[in-house]
Amino acid sequence: MTELNSTIRRFLTVSAVALALPMSAWAQQAAGSAPAAPAQDARASVQQRPHGHHGHHGRMDAGMRGDHLFMLRGLDLSSAQKDQAKALFEAQRPAMQEKRQAVREARDALHQLVISGKYSPERAAELAKDIAQKETAQMLFMAEQGNKLVQILTPEQRTKLQTRMQDKGAAHGGRR
């Protein structure tokens, strides 16, 4: 069980790091930074779509369904940077979908065990470990992609993004 706890702790640590970049940019946008006109058009089209599992605000839907640059709004990306970011997102999309599907299937397997009437703590622990490993792989992939995205930015843009992240952390009392 200690190995499972260690895996879960590692997963949570990696998750926190991997989510810091996009979530901090999202928080900055939600706090009122003015997005560029094309981003407003993209956001408007997202609001007309059915709501995703992230609630009625559509912010995560925007990132998942095509408005991938939402986390970079307000950083004044050049056309070349936008093209690089879009190419990066397009290139990683199939691998990310595969990783999401693997996590979904692992969670479904645990769910099936729970409702099957054949529950065993040992099998549940195995499935939970499998879920943790697949989620860790997904989070590491996201962190790697986030790092590639940050490499596209100029030093000034990185500084601005880091400031947003720090401000967001302070605004939430160090949470998230």
Image (cartoon, rainbow, N blue to C red):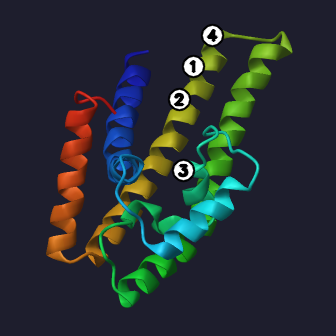
Compared with 1, 15 (above or below) is below
| Residue underneath mark 3 | 59
Number of numbered discs overlaid on the protein picture: 4
| Residue underneath mark 2 | 129
Tell me what residue is drawn at x 32 percent, y 36 percent. Answer: 13
Residue 165 relative to residue 32: left or right: left
Spatial CA distance of label 3 from label 1 is 34 Å
Where residue 42 appears, x then y in whole percent? 59, 68
Spatial CA distance of label 2 from label 1 is 6 Å
Going by the numbered disc 1, the residue's amino acid type is: Ala
| Residue underneath mark 4 | 121
Q: Secondary structure at mark 1?
A: helix
Tell me if label 4 and label 1 are in contact, CB under 8 Å: yes
Mark 1, Cα crowd under 10 Å, few <14 / some 14-19 / many 20+, is some
Spatial CA distance of label 3 from label 4 is 38 Å
Spatial CA distance of label 4 from label 1 is 6 Å
Tell me what residue is drawn at x 54 percent, y 50 percent. Answer: 59
Q: Secondary structure at mark 4?
A: helix
| Residue underneath mark 1 | 125
Tell me if label 3 and label 4 are in contact, CB under 8 Å: no
Which numbered mark, 3 or 4, is in the foreground of this view? Answer: 3
The C terminus appears in which quarter of the rendering? top left
User: Which mark sits nearer the N-terminus, 2 or 4?
Assistant: 4
